[in-house]
Image (cartoon, rainbow, N blue to C red):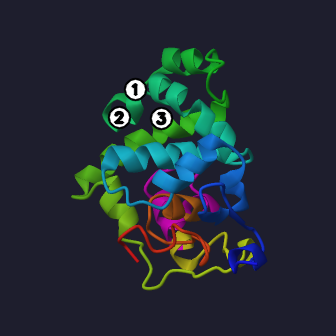
Amino acid sequence: MSDTAETPGVVTGADGLARPAWAEQSDLLRDYYDTEWGMPVRDEQGVFERLSLEAFQSGLSWATVLRKRPAFRDAFAGFDPDRVARFDDDDVERLMDDAAIIRNRAKILATIDNARATLSLRDDGTDLAEFVWSFRPDETPAPVAPGDVPSTSAESLALSKELKRRGFRWVGPTTMFALMEAIGIVDTHLVASHRRGTSGVW
């Protein structure tokens, strides 16, 4: 029996590669895990998109958001913060009528507010990506089993607090930790996973 077979929460796929069980639930999740999750995202628009999608995911499954991501990109102007910041009441109603996305008024309004807050960061001489990455910790977790993966950190708490101070919404410490995982700021790939240590950051 292989080591990965003995590791709780780790599955060896048909391709012989070890992944967490959640990444083997569908082709969509497997491809996302293998090619995107945990890889560095350092551009403003990319970070804004992922911050927005993490907020929409709150309380739902990531698979639901991932399936709807193309529709979200269409509905939110490719998550261009300059364009989303100009959304008005008509845009809100358009989004609320769009069955292809998650129609949550509070999250839609937060996304628009967050686009405006993203533009405000520029006035302070930084951009959203630089700002979020400035909260990178000195060390990253090294989880063996899914239960070892934290849901928050001192850095995600600090990032959440500072973003809220700067006008961002729906950016709680758990959501911000998920963002930090998704864009490579921390590496929470399980130690036995084929993706562990592949981001070039850790």
Residue 103 versus residue 111 in the image, above or below: above
Q: Upstream in the sequence, badge 2 or badge 3?
A: 2
- Quadrant containing the N terminus is bottom right
Labelled pair 2, 1 in contact (Cβ < 8 Å)? yes
* x then y, percent, for residue 40: 38, 60
Report x, y in % for residue 176.
55, 61
Q: Which residue is mark 1?
A: 77
- Most foreground residue, 193 or 146: 193
Residue 200 colored in magenta in the image: no
Distance between mark 1 and mark 3 Cα atoms: 11 Å
Q: Nearer the viewer, residue 7 or 132?
A: 7
For disc 1, the neighbor class at 10 Å (few under 14, some 14 to 19, many from 20) is few
Q: Is residue 70 left or right of residue 44?
A: right
Report the mark closest to the observer, 1 or 3. 1
User: Is there any visible trace of residue 194 in the rendered image?
Assistant: yes
Nearest the eye: 88 or 53 = 53
Q: Which residue is mark 2?
A: 80
Q: CA distance from mark 2 to mark 1?
A: 6 Å
Q: Residue at x 59, y 46 (%)?
A: 55
The residue where tag 3 is placed is: 112
Secondary structure state at the residue bearing disc 1: helix
Residue 169 visible in the snapshot: no
Residue at x 42%, y 69% (from the top left corner) = 198
Where's residue 103, x and y in %? 66, 27
Residue 175 position by quadrant? bottom right
Magenta residues span 158-176
